[in-house]
Each structure stands twice: as structure tokens, then as C-alpha cells.
Image (spheres, rainbow, N blue to C red):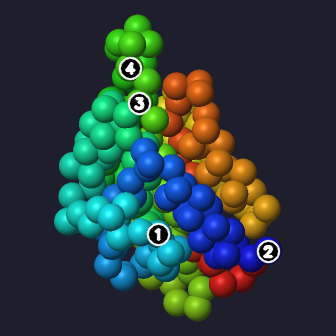
């Protein structure tokens, strides 16, 4: 089993759930390696957005509050940083602020940017996994080191019943290496 193939399998699995919607940049249009993992997902499940990360995360939370399970795609951690307010101050705190009355489930898909064969420079290859674990005690952050971890991580993110959202961290370099 290959890293990229497992990502495709996981996205196809998520797409079968009627509550799931994929949103972000280069989701319905090509543009990133993550786009390629959505090729077998029905077009009506893909919501292409402009480059407006905080708006995207706010939309994701809103969709989750009304029963959808958004898969909000930020191809690199560095882009997800632009949505920190929505993640840290809202998504992570909904359950606390509502005395467990609201427990929206969002799957945030992000990655550590690829440095091989071309290094895109440091503003595109950050890994903020540990920082988000510290900032978001009510969101699980799962880093995908091996292909065998991919499907179970996304399955857990979708099927969990503990009221938590999940940030799933992929490695760009592993798409072609593992």
C-alpha cells in the first residue's frame, strides 16, 4: 500500500458519507498534490473556495454546526495559520462555550510541504503539529507517518462520537516516496 493510494482510498471512503463535503482551494480544480487525491470524489461533494482561509474555517464550523462533516483542506500548515482564530477560539471551544450543547465535527486536512525534489522555501514547509496540540486541547491532531496509518485516521475522524474535531497532518514528500 502506497501513501498516495491510501489517501485516495480514505477520501473515497469519506465521500460515501452523505454528510461529508470537501472544501478549500484546489479542491474542485487542480492545483495541489491533495487535489489529485480527490479525483474519484463526486463533483457535487467538492466546494472550491477563494484564498480566504479564515472564511473557509468559519464556513467549516458553520456547516458542522448544522450536521455536515466538512473536510476542510489546507494543503500546508503555513496556510492553516491564517485560520488560527477560527480553529483555536471557535472550533476548539464550541463544546466548552455551549456546555456540550454544540459539538461540531470538522476534519481539517493539512500537510507538511514537500521539500523534494524542489524546496519551496521555509514559508511553505512548516510543521505546527505540536503547537496546535497545545493550543487546541479539544481537537485531536494526528500526524500520518506511514501509509498504514492513513485510512484508520480518517475513519476515526469521521466515525468518532466524542464531540471532537480532527486535524490530520500529511507529509507532502511521502506522496511519491512511500
Q: Which residue is mark 2?
A: 1
Query: Quick one: label 1, few (<14), some, or many (20+) residues within 10 Å?
Result: some
Residue at which label 3 appears: 104
Relative to 63, is 127 on the left or the right? right
Quarter where residue 61 is shown = top left
Residue position marked by numbered label 1 in the rendering: 41
Q: Which element type, helix, strand or loop, lies under badge 2?
A: loop
- Residue 86 shows up from this direction: no
Residue labelled with disc 4: 102
Q: Are marks 3 and 2 in contact (CB under 8 Å)?
A: no
Compute the Cα span from label 4 to label 1: 29 Å
Q: Which is more N-terminal, label 1 or label 3?
A: 1
Q: Is residue 2 above or below residue 161?
A: below
Q: CA distance from mark 4 to mark 3?
A: 6 Å
Image location (x, y in percent) of residue 178: 75, 78
Is disc 4 surrounded by few (<14), some (14 to 19) or many (20+) residues within 10 Å? some
Q: Measured along the vertical axis of the image, is residue 37 above or below residue 45?
A: below
Amino acid at each position: 500500500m502506497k501513501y498516495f493510494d491510501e489517501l485516495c482510498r480514505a477520501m473515497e471512503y469519506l465521500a460515501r458519507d452523505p454528510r461529508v463535503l470537501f472544501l478549500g482551494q484546489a479542491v474542485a480544480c487542480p492545483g495541489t498534490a491533495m487535489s489529485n487525491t480527490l479525483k474519484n470524489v463526486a463533483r457535487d461533494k467538492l466546494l472550491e473556495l477563494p484564498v480566504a482561509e479564515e472564511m473557509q474555517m468559519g464556513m467549516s464550523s458553520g456547516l458542522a454546526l448544522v450536521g455536515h462533516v466538512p473536510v476542510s483542506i489546507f494543503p500546508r500548515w503555513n496556510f492553516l495559520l491564517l485560520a488560527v482564530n477560527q480553529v483555536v477560539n471557535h472550533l476548539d471551544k464550541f463544546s466548552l462555550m455551549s456546555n456540550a450543547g454544540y459539538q461540531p465535527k470538522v476534519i481539517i486536512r493539512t500537510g507538511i510541504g514537500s521539500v523534494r525534489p524542489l524546496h519551496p522555501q521555509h514559508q511553505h514547509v512548516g510543521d505546527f503539529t505540536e503547537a496546535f496540540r497545545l493550543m487546541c486541547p479539544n481537537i485531536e491532531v494526528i500526524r500520518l507517518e506511514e501509509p498504514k496509518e492513513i485510512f484508520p485516521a480518517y475513519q476515526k475522524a469521521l466515525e468518532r462520537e466524542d464531540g471532537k474535531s480532527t486535524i490530520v497532518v500529511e507529509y507532502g514528500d511521502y506522496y511519491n516516496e512511500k
